[in-house]
Image: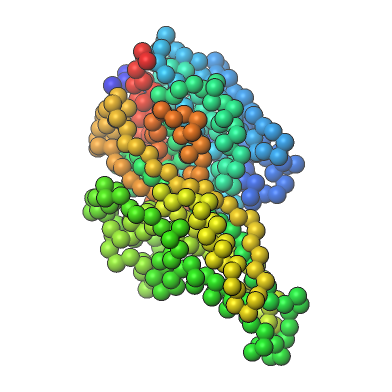
């Protein structure tokens, strides 16, 4: 359907003013997720983030209900109910996002910083802007524009959590408790995802799962002089290497455990070949020197990024800085390992296989311990159909001038199975503004403001497109 032009005009004004300023205020808050802030409960920053966001929302939509839900030890979440307008009798819409953030990281360009919102050349820089604070402001702005134009819409529910960057360990409980109040949504919109470019609406059809753990290899209770101990005492680092070689082929990056791999469906392979012809994911990175991708073709790169498992070492303990490293044989080496598992892999079974492989028959009988083990399976979303597909295609064509694109994501949102369990008949609209070079989690994170504005228009079309009669 085509909405009145004043809906789009209202959205444009908002992104030039109130919506942009609200998102800037959000960026200023160091709302680091609990994995990166052990004092999150006592300092109250996550709750204050929700309170500030709710206050902005109440000013925008006085008729809406904003409720901060929390339990001791659980990061809080913001639940929103927007009542029906214009006598609409259709199913409700349901929107999900998060307002917690990754840590600062080093390396921001001059004049930029994680908690300093800066607009340059149509981009809004700052931590949490594109991952995924814009989602909240975009969604409420779309509803406000519809109401200002007098357009009918069904009941709308939103859930914005503050633990996504830490794995959303408790979100499933919130979803289960809220599900009876939400009912049977016409769709579940997850706008915490990516886009291949800024030329169309992109829907993500699959995400990989995640397995993470900390493994410690200890060979001594006390470090020793390297000249006296080496050759007698095995290096903890060497044993760690040997253990990792059981899991990963160091020459190719291929993961060797059957539990980490799955057969890629033929239709997915066909879609990946098509996507690879439209763009090369290998061109999205700032390569150092003569470094090049593991994959030899664009298709292979896309396949390994979205439907093959991978392992990264994301943290280390027991290793002193090089400038302060004496001739000492260290007592232990600890690594934080992060695995991405294919969408159809059982992440818990994969985690069990990894732990078993790392801890059985250890060379030299070294002491191996595993801690902070976590697992969340991936997700495959069916293609939208019926009115939803038609609305998405029409909105994409009218607003972007291009058809809807479909992609597969190498990242993870571990709570999607929980949404599916709570709302088994509701289709997903997995979309977002996170482009290949938007630097989420990294220095110079940025949001394309023009794309965010257009995506707001698409959300308005989706809400208004819900059939009024069930």
Spot occupied by residue 377 in the image (x, y as percentages of width and height): 48, 47
Give the residue drawn at x 41%, y 12%: 89
Tell me where residue 239 sits by quadrant: bottom right
Q: Is residue 401 left or right of residue 82?
A: left
Question: Looking at the figure, which quarter contains the N terminus?
Answer: top left
Q: Is residue 15 at least partly visible in the picture?
A: no
Give the residue drawn at x 49%, y 33%: 421
- Give whichever of 166, 174 is nearer the camera: 174
Residue situated furthest front in the rendering: 361
Give the residue drawn at x 60%, y 55%: 373
Spot occupied by residue 91 in the image (x, y as percentages of width and height): 42, 19
Spot occupied by residue 368 in the image (x, y as percentages of width and height): 65, 68
In the rendered image of this protein, does residue 433 appear above or below residue 441? above
Q: Is residue 59 left or right of residue 431?
A: right
Q: Is residue 368 at least partly visible in the picture?
A: yes
Spot occupied by residue 18 in the image (x, y as percentages of width and height): 50, 29
């Amino acid at each position: 359907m085509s909405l009145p032009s004043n809906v789009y005009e209202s959205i444009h004004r908002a992104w030039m003013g109130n919506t942009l300023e609200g998102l800037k205020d959000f960026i200023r808050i160091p709302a680091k997720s609990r994995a990166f802030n052990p004092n999150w409960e006592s300092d109250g920053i996550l709750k204050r983030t929700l309170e500030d966001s709710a206050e902005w929302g109440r000013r925008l939509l006085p008729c809406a209900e904003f409720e901060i839900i929390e339990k001791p030890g659980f990061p809080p979440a913001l639940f929103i109910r927007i009542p029906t307008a214009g006598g609409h009798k259709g199913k409700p819409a349901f929107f999900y996002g998060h307002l917690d953030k990754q840590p600062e990281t080093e390396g921001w360009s001059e004049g930029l910083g994680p908690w300093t919102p800066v607009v340059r050349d149509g981009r809004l820089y700052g931590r949490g802007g594109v991952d995924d604070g814009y989602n909240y402001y975009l969604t409420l702005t779309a509803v406000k524009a519809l109401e200002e134009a007098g357009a009918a819409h069904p009941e709308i529910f939103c859930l914005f959590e503050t633990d996504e960057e830490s794995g959303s360990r408790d979100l499933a409980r919130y979803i289960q408790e809220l599900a009876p109040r939400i009912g049977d949504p016409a769709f579940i919109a997850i706008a915490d995802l990516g886009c291949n470019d800024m030329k169309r609406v992109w829907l993500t059809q699959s995400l990989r799962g995640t397995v993470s753990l900390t493994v410690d290899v200890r060979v001594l209770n006390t470090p020793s002089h390297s000249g006296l101990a080496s050759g007698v005492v095995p290096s903890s680092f060497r044993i760690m290497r040997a253990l990792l070689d059981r899991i990963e082929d160091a020459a190719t990056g291929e993961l060797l455990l059957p539990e980490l791999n799955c057969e890629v469906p033929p239709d997915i392979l066909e879609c990946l070949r098509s996507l690879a012809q439209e763009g090369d994911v290998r061109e999205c990175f700032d390569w150092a020197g003569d470094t090049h991708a593991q994959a030899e073709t664009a298709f292979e790169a896309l396949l390994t990024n979205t439907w093959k498992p991978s392992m990264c070492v994301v943290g280390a303990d027991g290793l002193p800085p090089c400038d302060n490293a004496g001739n000492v044989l260290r007592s232990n080496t600890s690594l934080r390992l992060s695995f991405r598992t294919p969408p159809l892999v059982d992440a818990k079974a994969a985690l069990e296989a990894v732990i078993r492989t790392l801890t059985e028959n250890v060379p030299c009988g070294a002491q191996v311990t595993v801690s902070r083990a976590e697992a969340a399976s991936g997700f495959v979303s069916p293609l939208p159909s019926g009115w939803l597909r038609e609305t998405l295609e029409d909105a994409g064509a009218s607003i972007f001038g291009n058809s809807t694109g479909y992609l597969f994501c190498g990242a993870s949102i571990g709570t999607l199975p929980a949404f599916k369990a709570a709302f088994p008949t509701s289709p997903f609209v997995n979309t977002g503004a996170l482009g290949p070079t938007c630097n989420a989690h990294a220095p110079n994170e940025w949001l394309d403001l023009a794309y965010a504005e257009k995506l707001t228009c698409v959300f308005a079309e989706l809400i208004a497109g819900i059939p009024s009669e069930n």
